[in-house]
Amino acid sequence: MPDTAVVTGAARGIGRAIAQRLVDEGWHVVISDRDADALEQVAREVAACPLVADVSTDAGNRALVEGAFGHLGRIDLFVANAGIGTGLGLEASDAVWARALDVNVLAHVRAARELVPRWLEAGVPGRFVVTASAAGLLTMLGDAPYSVTKHAAVAFAEWLDATYRHRGVTVHAICPQGVDTRMLADAGALRELLTRERVVTPEQVADALWEAMASGSFLVLPHPEVAEYHVQRVSHPDAWLAGMNRLQQKLEQATDPSDPNAQPTPKQENA
């Protein structure tokens, strides 16, 4: 019987590429997104089953999991890929923070709450993937809610792995830097910062996940250099923060060379 998977945030970008890779490998896949029209088009292109859902809510996650079980019969892999950026710092409102937390963190928690007990009760292995970001291991200048929530997403994935690994639940955290997606294209002044290193395609992220699934690696690093940066951050936090502050100053100058206190233009886009 073919393996089965659910991929959220699959109407474009990384989610679409992961769904395509799984289908190409012979998996039966349910894809989900809030954008019904885009989701239907992707479903036709990759030969997956579309289920429109808002995974930022408890009800949306529950409906997605129930619908996927109904269509697939079981769920071997859940890819919690949906995510948003804000482009905001201290000016971000409580509502913006709440939305970022709901999509970038609590969506993972709510999906795991639905899935893990089922896997344990049935005595079957399950695989849970969190699409986080290199921001979750490092930080993201110009976007406080994104940076903080991606750190939380990595922390939740770590907790899930540490708690349930011995009971058959495998967890992966995807932590790329710049990926050629709509979010990157719409990043404004942050685009230059995000493209200082190599930009990878969504398909390369999907390939990295497939390799991590084969090897059992927790961290999925389409940009392997992120591992070195992470070690530097932990080993030399003051030097690392000083370096990040220098990048912040360059970002502000690039945004408005005439104003040393200028900040990036706020943006909010779906991942």
Image (spheres, rainbow, N blue to C red):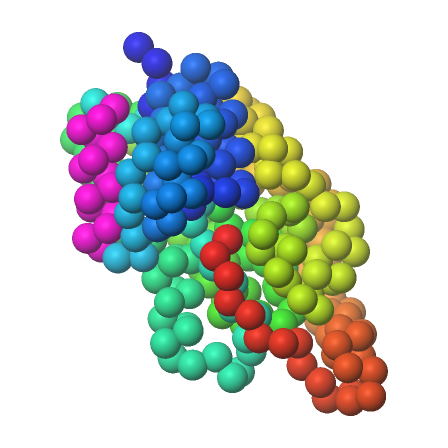
Q: Position of residue 218 (x, y in %)?
A: 51, 38
Q: Quadrant of the N terminus?
A: top left
Q: Is residue 35 left or right of residue 193?
A: left
Instruction: Using the rendered view, name the quadrant where residue 249 is placed.
Output: bottom right
Relative depth, front residue between 121 and 270: 270
| Residue drawn at point x = 51 percent, y = 84 percent | 91
Give the overall secondary structure of the magenta segment: helix
Q: Position of residue 138 (x, y in %)?
A: 63, 59
Q: Is residue 77 above or below residue 239?
A: above
Q: Is residue 189 above or below residue 109?
A: below
Instruction: Using the rendered view, name the quadrant where residue 2 is placed.
Output: top left
User: Could you tell me if residue 155 is visible in this image?
Assistant: no
| Residue drawn at point x = 48 percent, y = 57 percent | 270
| Residue drawn at point x = 51 percent, y = 25 percent | 21
Q: Position of residue 57 (x, y in %)?
A: 26, 57
Q: Is residue 267 left or right of residue 263?
A: left
**Residue range highlighted in magenta:** 58-72
Relative depth, front residue between 41 and 99: 41
Instruction: Using the rendered view, name the quadrant where residue 44 is placed.
Output: top left
Q: Is residue 56 above or below residue 259?
A: above
The magenta stretch spans residue 65: yes
| Residue drawn at point x = 60 percent, y = 38 percent | 202
Residue sitting at the far top: 1
Q: Position of residue 53 (x, y in %)?
A: 28, 47
